[in-house]
Image: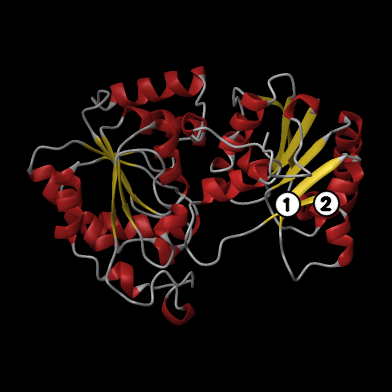
C-alpha cells in the first residue's frame, strides 16, 4: 500500500470486491488483469465481476473470479416485465454480496445507481468533468485518465487500483482468458478434421463488425494466396453474421487458394483455443487480437483509425502495421464517417507480408 496516498485502501480489509465493465468483448477481456491484481494483493477477498451477458465468456472461469453477474441487453425482445424482473433480481443479488469496494471501469450512467445499490464502503471510477453531482457522490475515489493516446487500455484499467494504493507487479498484468476443457477438445477435433496441427498454421482474422477497422477483402485474399504459394497452412476465422459476413463473402470472391474456413463455426472460447494452437495470428483491431494476447500467440496487427498505443497487442511478440497518415489515429468510423478508412485501405500487402516474415 502506498505511503503517499492518505486515502489508500488496505487490501487486507477487503472482503468482497465488484469489478464493473459494461463494454464490448475486447474491452472486457482487457479488464481481466484487474481481477488478477486484486486477488494477488487481497488473497482473502472474493472478487466478482459484472458485464453484459454476451461478453461473459471473456471472464468466465477466470482463476481470480468468485462470481460473474450479467446484464441482458436483449430485453426489448423479451418485454418490459422480463427486464424489470431481471433488474430487480440483479440488484438484490448485488446488495446481498455486501461489497467493500466497487471498481467501475465503464462510464455508463446506470453504474452510479448500481454502485449505490451495493452499499459498498468504497468505490472508484475514472474522473470525468461532465458528470453530475449525483454521479460524483456515488464514488469515493477517482483516477485520472491520460490525455491523448498515451497509455494502453490495460494500464488505464490498472490505474483504478493504483489510485487505491494497489500497484501491479510486472508479472501480474497478463490478459487472461480460460477456454475450458470443452472448448479445448472441440478445437482439437476441428483442427484434426482439417489436418491442422498445433503450431503449424497461421490464423487470419481479417474482419471486424466495425467495417472501418477491416482491411480490404481483396488484399486479404492476395495475402492468403501468397502465403499458400509459400507452403503455409491458413485457418480463416470470423463471424458469419452481420456486416462481417458480407465482408467475408467478398473475400472468397477474390481468393484463389484453398483455406481452412472456420468462420461462423467457433464460440468465443473455441476461438481462443484455436488461437492458442496457431503459430501466428494476423488481424485487425478487434476482440480476436486481444484473445491472441491472452493466449500468448505472436501477432501481426493492422491498425487504421484506432490507436495501437491504446489497443495494440499486449505482452506478446508482435508487429503493428500502420500507414503514415498524419490524421491517424482519429477514432472516427471511416474518413468523414464513411465506414471506409483510407489509412487501412492503402496498406500494401508487401508490408504485411514483411511483418509476418519478421515473426
Q: Is mark 2 on a helix, strand or loop?
A: loop
Q: In the displayed structure, does residue 352 sit left or right of residue 148?
A: left
Answer yes or no: is residue 256 visible. no
Q: Name the residue under label 2.
A: 139
Q: Mark 1 points at which residue?
A: 125
Q: How many C-alpha atoms fall within 10 Å of the one at disc 1: few (<14), some, or many (≥20)?
A: many
- Residue 315 placement (x, y as % from top left): 39, 38
Q: How many C-alpha atoms fall within 10 Å of the one at disc 2: few (<14), some, or many (≥20)?
A: many
Q: In the displayed structure, does residue 286 sit left or right of residue 65?
A: left
Tell me if residue 348 comes above or below residue 277 in the rendering. below
Q: Earlier in the sequence, mark 1 or mark 2?
A: 1
- Comparing 125 with 357, the one in front is 125
Q: What sort of colour scheme is used for the picture?
A: secondary structure
- Residue 223 placement (x, y as % from top left): 18, 53
- Residue 221 placement (x, y as % from top left): 22, 55
Which image quadrant is residue 136 in? bottom right
Q: Residue at image x 91%, y 44%? A: 117
Q: Is mark 1 on a helix, strand or loop?
A: strand
Mark carried by residue 106: none
Mark 1 and mark 2: span between their CA atoms? 7 Å
Q: Residue at image x 80%, y 45%? A: 123
Q: Residue at image x 86%, y 45%? A: 87
- Residue 173 placement (x, y as % from top left): 51, 35
Amino acid at each position: 500500500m502506498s505511503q503517499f496516498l492518505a486515502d489508500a485502501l488496505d487490501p487486507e480489509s477487503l472482503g468482497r470486491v465488484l469489478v464493473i465493465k459494461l463494454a464490448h468483448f475486447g474491452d472486457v477481456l482487457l479488464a481481466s488483469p484487474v481481477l488478477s491484481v486484486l486477488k494477488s494483493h487481497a488473497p482473502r477477498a472474493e472478487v466478482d465481476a459484472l458485464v453484459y451477458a454476451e461478453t461473459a465468456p471473456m471472464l468466465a472461469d477466470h482463476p481470480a473470479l468468485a462470481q460473474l453477474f450479467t446484464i441482458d441487453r436483449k430485453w426489448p425482445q423479451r418485454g418490459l416485465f422480463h427486464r424489470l424482473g431481471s433488474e430487480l433480481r440483479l440488484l438484490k443479488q448485488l446488495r446481498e454480496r455486501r461489497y467493500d469496494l466497487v471498481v467501475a471501469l465503464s462510464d455508463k450512467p446506470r453504474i452510479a445507481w448500481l454502485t449505490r445499490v451495493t452499499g459498498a464502503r468504497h468505490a472508484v471510477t475514472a474522473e470525468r468533468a461532465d458528470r453530475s453531482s449525483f454521479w460524483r457522490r456515488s464514488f469515493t475515489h477517482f483516477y485520472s485518465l491520460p490525455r491523448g493516446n498515451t497509455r494502453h487500455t490495460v494500464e488505464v484499467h490498472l490505474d483504478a487500483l493504483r489510485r487505491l494504493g494497489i500497484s501491479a507487479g510486472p508479472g501480474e498484468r497478463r490478459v487472461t482468458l480460460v477456454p475450458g476443457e470443452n472448448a479445448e477438445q472441440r478445437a482439437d477435433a476441428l483442427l484434426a478434421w482439417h489436418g491442422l496441427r498445433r503450431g503449424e498454421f497461421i490464423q487470419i482474422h481479417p474482419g471486424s463488425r466495425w467495417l472501418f477497422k477491416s482491411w480490404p477483402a481483396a488484399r486479404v485474399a492476395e495475402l492468403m494466396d501468397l502465403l499458400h504459394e509459400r507452403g503455409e497452412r491458413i485457418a480463416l476465422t470470423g463471424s458469419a453474421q452481420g456486416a462481417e459476413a458480407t465482408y467475408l463473402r467478398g473475400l472468397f470472391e477474390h481468393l484463389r487458394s484453398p483455406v481452412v474456413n472456420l468462420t461462423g463455426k467457433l464460440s468465443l472460447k473455441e476461438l481462443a483455443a484455436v488461437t492458442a494452437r496457431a503459430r501466428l495470428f494476423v488481424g485487425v483491431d478487434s476482440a480476436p487480437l486481444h484473445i491472441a494476447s491472452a493466449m500468448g500467440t505472436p501477432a501481426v496487427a493492422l491498425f487504421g483509425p484506432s490507436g495501437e498505443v491504446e489497443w495494440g497487442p499486449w505482452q506478446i511478440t508482435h508487429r503493428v502495421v500502420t500507414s503514415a497518415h498524419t490524421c491517424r489515429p482519429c477514432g472516427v468510423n471511416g474518413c468523414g464517417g464513411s465506414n471506409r478508412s483510407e489509412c487501412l485501405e492503402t496498406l500494401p500487402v508487401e508490408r504485411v507480408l514483411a511483418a509476418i516474415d519478421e515473426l
